[in-house]
Image: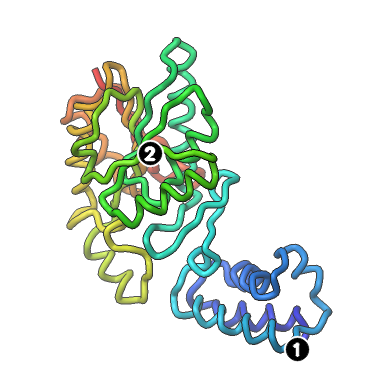
Amino acid sequence: MIIRAALSDGAAALASVSETPFLDASLLLARALGASRERVLAMGPEELDETGGSAFRGLIARRAAGEPVAYILGLKEFRGLEFGVDERVLCPRPDTELLVEAALRTARSFAASDRAPLRIHDAFTGSGAVAVALAAELGDSAAVSMSDLSPDALELARENARRLLGHELPAALSDCMEGVDGPFELVTANPPYVTSMFCDGIYASGGKEPRLALDGGPDGLGLYRRLAPRAREVLAPGGVLAVEIGDEQGSAVSALFRAAGFGEVDVLRDLGGRDRVVLGVSP
């Protein structure tokens, strides 16, 4: 079989489980052949040998069973960095880049007012994608730390920091920042915000990502109820809390911020016009 036909067959096998079946198939064939995706696409008319074909079929079977491509590859790109990922953590999503962008704007506005080095904490850090991206982009102007309830996730976040930054980030095993000492100028968080009922559907359909990182309780807001008042306790005066949210949670999370005493509450929308980030300023 030629490579072009193998890719077509692989994409067809993934059509029912992936929104991007051809992309998935080409990434998996690249892994099977030990080549770049670009090289694989250029090899379209060439024959696929039996060793490569067998490896490719095995990877396609794993993806067809619901395993994320990032878990199969062990890597996920986020803001130009390749993070190690596996079943201990959620795969970083492009949606979360808006949270990083909002945090960077906030950090740079603080830096312009001589509040440096900034103290930044990323709660519910998971793979460490947000914390490491901020540390990489802000450099010495910020002191970034992170926390998570899962010891397995925190171990992977530490590994990513060491590999991508060349040094550790302070990391605490913590439930919703309990025991994390401030003050901080900025707290970021991408907490679990999927409703428990929706999670049930995800796992009934073969979902592989950890429920601890997805399930936000009956209404998806449970962690925001705890995080907002806790963040107020550890933020310096004028400090900012920035969180990622579900695409219909802007009003509800904004109300929780205001109830916790935050002012200047704002909802940022993604390119699709969906609620994605809420920010609030501590008095």
Crowd tier of the residue under label 1, counting other residues whose Cα lies within 10 Å: few below 14, some 14–19, many 20 or above: few
Q: Residue at x 44, y 75 (%)?
A: 66
Of the residues shown, which amino acid type is indicated by label 1? Met
Label 2 amino acid? Answer: Val
Residue 121 on image: x %, y %:
35, 33
Which residue, given by chain and number where applicable, does mark 1 sit on?
1
Q: Is mark 1 on a helix, strand or loop?
A: loop
Residue 74 numbered tag: none
Which is more toward the observer, 60 or 157?
Answer: 157
Which one is earlier in the sequence, the residue at label 2 or at label 1?
Answer: 1
- Of the 4 image quadrants, the one containing the N terminus is bottom right
Examine the rendered structure and indicate whether residue 205 appears above or below residue 36: below
Q: Are marks 2 and 1 in contact (CB under 8 Å)?
A: no
Relative to residue 165, is residue 32 drawn left or right?
Answer: right
The spot of residue 135 in percent (x, y) is 48, 34
Question: Quick one: which residue is furthest to the right in this view?
Answer: 45
For the point 47% across and 52% down, which residue is it?
93
Nearer the observer, 165 or 36: 165
Picture quarter with the C terminus? top left
Query: Mark 2: few, some, or many residues within 10 Å (few <14, many ≥20)?
Result: many
**Mark 2 or 1: the one toward you:** 1
| Circle 2 residue | 277
Quick one: 264 or 78, which is closer to the camera? 78
| Residue in front for this viewpoint, 82 or 280 | 82
Residue 98 in sight: no
